Amino acid sequence: MAARIIYTHTDEAPLLATYSFLPIVSAFAAKAGVEVETRDISVAARILAQFGLADDALGELGDLAKTPEANIVKLPNISASIPQLKAAIKELQEKGYEIPDYPEAPSTPEEEEIRAKYDKVKGSAVNPVLREGNSDRRAPGSVKAYAKAHPHTNKPFADNSKTTVATMGAHDFKSNEKSVTLPADDALSIVLEKADGETVTLLAELPVLQGEIVDATYMSAANLHAFLENALAKAKADDVLFSLHLKATMMKVSDPIIFGHVVKAYFKDVFEKYGADLEAAGLSANDGLGAILSGLSGLEKGAEIEAAFKAAIEAGPRLSYVNSDKGITNLHVPSDVIIDASIPALVRNGGKLWGADGGEDDTLAVIPDSSYAGVYQTVIDDVKKNGPLDPATIGTVPNVGLMAQKAEEYGSHDKTFQIEAAGTVRVLNKAGDVLIEHDVEAGDIWRACQTKDIPVRDWVKLAVSRARDSKTPAVFWLDESRAHDAELIKKVTTYLTEHDTEGLEIKILSPELATAYSLERLRNGEDTISVTGNVLRDYNTDLFPILEVGTSAKMLSIVPLIAGGGLFETGAGGSAPKHVQQLVEEDYLRWDSLGEFFALVPSFEKYAEQASAPAAKVLAGALDRATATFLENDRSPGRKLGTTDNRGSHFYLGLYWAQELAAQTEDTELAAAFKGLAETLAANEDKIVEELLAVQGKPADIGGYYLPDAEKVTAVMRPSATLNEAIDSL
């Protein structure tokens, strides 16, 4: 297979930015003989692929990721919640695609089949397919240098701050977890034996490999209700904002159910009075308050129910708001408040979130499951005691994350169930032996997950390698009192003996102790590698970057694939929806493509290795230097009209990249090829900037949200004729 770079088309702001940036990348790459192709893995394309209306690009890339030839640049994509999935389906139907509605409660084999197809699209469906390797994620040196020279502000907590974390601590996923390591290849089954003696097969066959860790646990619905009642009462008594923090994208089965419990708890009186009406109308608390309110218009009691919700908000604990100007609360959309980004934002803002009037206030941050809630409480306690972290002086906490081959995919896919009746859930091996069992009640949320042995071995190897190369202590964030972690610790201690660790500082600490240790070193200006499982990988690679450099979008994320290829991820996409809204309203895209700039450097280097193409390495080196200049000159998008937006940032990156290529002496042919472009772009800087600024301030038509019109988006994202001519003529 010929070497090539696959650049992914995804969703929202990253997709829009691609229409501006990719023409520059493709033109520069072509001059060096580097082949760049695209694959559409957007939520719209994935839906269409399920019904044979588009190529299965995700499946193709999943197969490619298992080969040494893989070289994939993966931009942030929508991890679709149910409301997002329904919105995407509606848009595609309106565009003429004959696809079925999402069956909320399938009642026929045909509806079951349709639901199964859509279930392959919702939630974090892309990442498990592509991540056939473990994660190496860190802030590039140029980003840290910029943050030190131009530090953002981490606000202090007030002396009397009431902000704290509320978590269950018992009867939850952490406390009920059981774990086993399989002695041989096997096929497991999961069954529910009801109290009346009926046996229901929840999962008929779960293939497992020798050495694989299998976990199972459950969250008690009754105890969740009691916890939520107490949390709501505490928020009301303390007069703080009530905010919920989940991961309804990655934990796409469990966390929307938990979200629904919180909606029902907050609006308890409304659901007691009108629950039957809402259920009859197909309006589910799991989809959030926003979906319920939007579905009331056709109901006979719609206005009455809407007034009841409004009255409940006025009478209940004060809610935190996602967008107070539009009346969007913390409970409107399950995917609006994602814990990875929402809690670090709270910490950065001095422990305050935003209320109904847009004002800031202390917050009760509700994280029902206690597995990692202590990490955030430890950070809050540290900042309260020691003051805010100073980006100008602190060290860094990069991450080595276990995620290959769907490791630790909690609360998602086909191994998470809402229990229909009281009984016992059992995990059985092929011989019929009970490996794990739990007594459960109706409504409990039961989940299992797998972690294969090869990814763990590779994870340990990557951690040791990073510790040695960076001369930095590495800490495995594992809690020996937690069932899964105890099994993982056995493997880690075994596999560490396979490596030369002399002179290296490698620790195993519980997440809370690891947080405190890393923060202490961070304040001393020292670096510490966090070596974590999959979920903590997600959390830590937002938490520390947001406090260190202001955002997680500026991280370098390399996934050395186990088969020898490379996956290069480009940062977080949590604020992408707001950026799209701003573009449509005033033709201004605030999205920062810095993550793409960083990802392309190792991608070009990988291509140089795969194709024995030294020119690709020259491209990489020039891009790396150009990105440093880009940061030094502060060319990232501004926040307001009249400043450089995403398109302007691409122009400046192209200018600096061309100048670096023209000035380098490693490849004289490339230098000559880019001399004219560098001169043209520099000479026309004012004209190009003027053309890019001229379009701002007016609405922009992109022809759709989930499947925008390519021609319209191209026109919007490439508005400078001078820049286009210079790039296209290269």
Image (cartoon, rainbow, N blue to C red):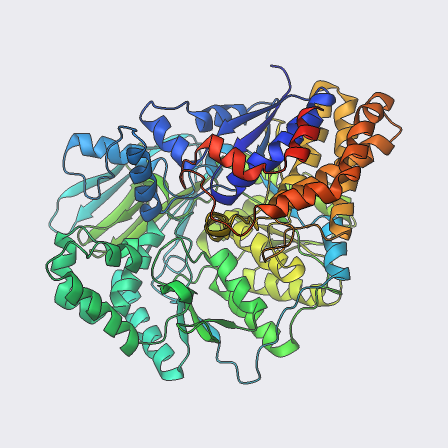
Q: Residue furthest right?
A: 665
> Which residue: 84% across, 24% down?
672
Residue 342 versus residue 425 in the image, above or below:
below
Query: 374 or 43, which lies in front?
Result: 43
Can the viewer see residue 154? Answer: yes
Could you tell me how many numbered marks the image carries?
0
Q: Which residue is drawn at 37% across and 36% down?
A: 121
595 and 226: which one is in front? 595
Q: In which quarter of the image is the N terminus?
A: top right
Q: Which of 34 and 385 is in front in this view?
A: 34
488 horizontally vs 728: left or right:
left
Q: Is residue 156 left or right of residue 310?
A: right
Residue under the image location 38 percent in, 57 percent down: 173
Q: Left or right of 654: which side holds 400?
A: left
Q: Quadrant of the C terminus?
A: top right
Residue drawn at (57%, 46%) of the image: 695
Residue occupying the far top of the picture? 1
Quarter of the image for residue 565 reads: top right
Instruction: Say above or below: 624 vs 48.
Output: below
Q: Where is residue 118 in the image (x, y as percent from the top left)?
A: 31, 36
Q: In this view, does 313 lie above or below 514?
A: below
Q: In this view, does 125 lie above or below 59?
A: below
Residue 129, how many percent across, how many down? 47, 33
Q: Where is residue 356 in the image (x, y as percent from the top left)?
A: 39, 72
Q: Where is residue 587 in the image (x, y as percent from the top left)?
A: 52, 48
Residue nearer the viewer, 531 or 660: 660
Residue 271, by quadrant, is bottom left
For residue 375, say whether it is visible. Answer: no
